[in-house]
Amino acid sequence: MSSSDDDDVMAVDAVTGGSLAPSASVYAAAIDIVREVAKGHPQSDRSRLLLRCCDSDVWDDDRYRLLLELRRPQESPTLRASKWSCQPPLTSDELVAWGQTVPLYGDYETPATDDELALEPQPSDAFKPTDGILFDNEVRHAKHQLTEDRRKAVLSRQWLHVAHAVQQITYFVHPVVAARASGDIFVGLTEASVPWGTGTTIGFDVIGNKRSGTLPEHTDVDPVCAADDGEDYRNNVFKVTADFERMAGTVSVHKMSGYGDDRRFVDAPRQHHTFSLKGWRSARLWVSMRSMEDTVELVKVTCL
């Protein structure tokens, strides 16, 4: 068998669920083969899905998302993160059923005015309901419930404003499930009052990578990557503070021990980031999750 034939076999394995780990050139061959197969049956559900995958941004750093749309919904984040090969394609009925699992709340508030934000909020340890996010009864656990790996932002109910009597607020956030050890869940602050609104947004992951922008749902990652020591810190606790006396925001990451009510985090942070809030009129917690089934808990909110 020639080298080219070997590549074809590996490429077909990649598309049909083989267990080989292909090179970048083999991935390219897989895409070519998929397109040729799809051209022969342009009206089939499988072909349309294959072509959608070929034309979308399905490559990522871990090289496991060859055909994102063909994954089974019951596949766990751990399995998805460790296996790049795809599952058999979903039927049309399965895709419809899967899409119906995405939470839609329908109560879409307009972005708050500055006068509204200047009013004192009711104390709350809860998130704001957001489409695509599944919440527990207390709205303190937020689970990424889209049908694909795509960034989704969630904000806290409680906020801080420069006109408030209290000038400092701190949020404690615990990532309960994260598909990746880094680059997955980012936590920080935003000026926006709703995820689909506008406002300066800044946050970090557990190893110090930074995302920022003016749209909570669409932030950009800093091109300078944080150093990765190879350890897995995905369950570390985030401590996020907005301080309008100093006009500064801080995000620190702390190791944690214990579970449930016995959780304790180390006072000395592993990571500590400070950024200016100059020009900000309000601030609230911002969390961005990328992977299906990522889950975070808003442990508590304190004000000083």
Image: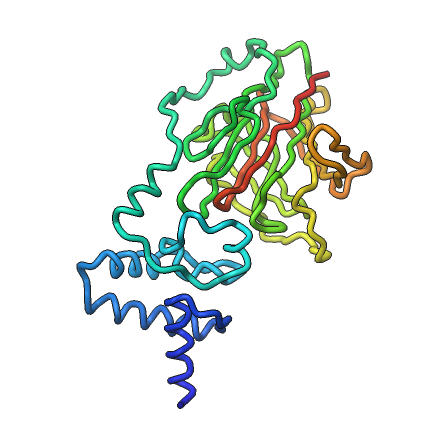
Q: Is residue 274 visible?
A: no
Query: Up-down: is 260 above or below 5?
Result: above
Horizontal relation, residue 155 to residue 167: left or right: left
**The C terminus is located in which quarter?**
top right
* Residue 235 screen position, x and y as percent: 67, 42
Q: Residue furthest left?
A: 43
Give the camera-side residue of 79 and 296: 79
Q: Quadrant of residue 45?
A: bottom left
Query: Up-down: is 252 above or below 32?
Result: above
Residue appearing at x 29%, y 56% in the figure: 49
Horizontal relation, residue 78 to residue 1: left or right: right
Q: Quadrant of residue 130?
A: top left
* Residue 252 screen position, x and y as percent: 72, 36
Q: Is residue 99 visible?
A: yes
Horizontal relation, residue 291 to residue 51: left or right: right
Residue appearing at x 38%, y 37% in the figure: 101
* Residue 137 screen position, x and y as percent: 51, 23
Q: Quadrant of residue 245?
A: top right
Residue appearing at x 37%, y 71% in the figure: 30
